[in-house]
Image (cartoon, rainbow, N blue to C red):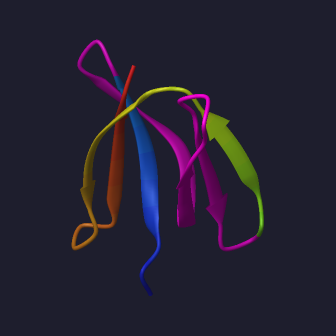
């Protein structure tokens, strides 16, 4: 399985945004669209800090 969990890093703390993210798409307005393996979608406006697919982690920064 290649999905990853997405987190938001804010003031040194990581908050889980979405589990089992299968698709990450940048949008024109500076947001990212996250879609998980169940088809759930979430939009986030943050800076993409790191994607570590070996550890199955996507980190955004507020």
Seen at 45% across and 27% down, the residue is 46
Residue 29 x/y as whole percent: 61, 29
Tell me the quarter of the picture where residue 37 sits: bottom right
Tell me the quarter of the picture where residue 4 sits: bottom left
Q: Is residue 16 above or below residue 5?
A: above
Compare residues 43 and 5 and report the one nearer the observer: 43
Residue 28 among those drawn in magenta: yes
Residue 26 among those drawn in magenta: yes
Seen at 42% across and 41% down, the residue is 7
Residue 35 x/y as whole percent: 66, 60
36 sits left or right of 14 in the view = right
Residue 12 x/y as whole percent: 23, 19
Q: Is residue 48 above or below residue 1?
A: above
51 sits left or right of 34 in the view = left
Seen at 57% across and 33% down, the residue is 31
Compare residues 33 and 18 and report the one nearer the observer: 33
Compare residues 52 and 27 and report the one nearer the observer: 27
2 sits left or right of 51 in the view = right
Range drawn in magenta = 10-38
11 sits left or right of 26 in the view = left
Residue 44 x/y as whole percent: 58, 33
Quadrant the N terminus occupies: bottom left
Q: Is residue 11 above or below residue 50?
A: above
Quadrant the C terminus occupies: top left
Helix, strand or loop: magenta stretch: strand
Seen at 60% across and 37% down, the residue is 28
């Amino acid at each position: 399985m290649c999905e990853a969990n997405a987190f938001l890093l804010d003031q040194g703390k990581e908050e889980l945004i979405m589990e089992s993210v299968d698709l990450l798409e940048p949008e024109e307005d500076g947001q990212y669209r996250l879609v998980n393996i169940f088809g759930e979608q979430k939009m986030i406006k943050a800076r993409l800090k790191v994607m570590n697919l070996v550890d199955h982690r996507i980190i955004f920064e507020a």
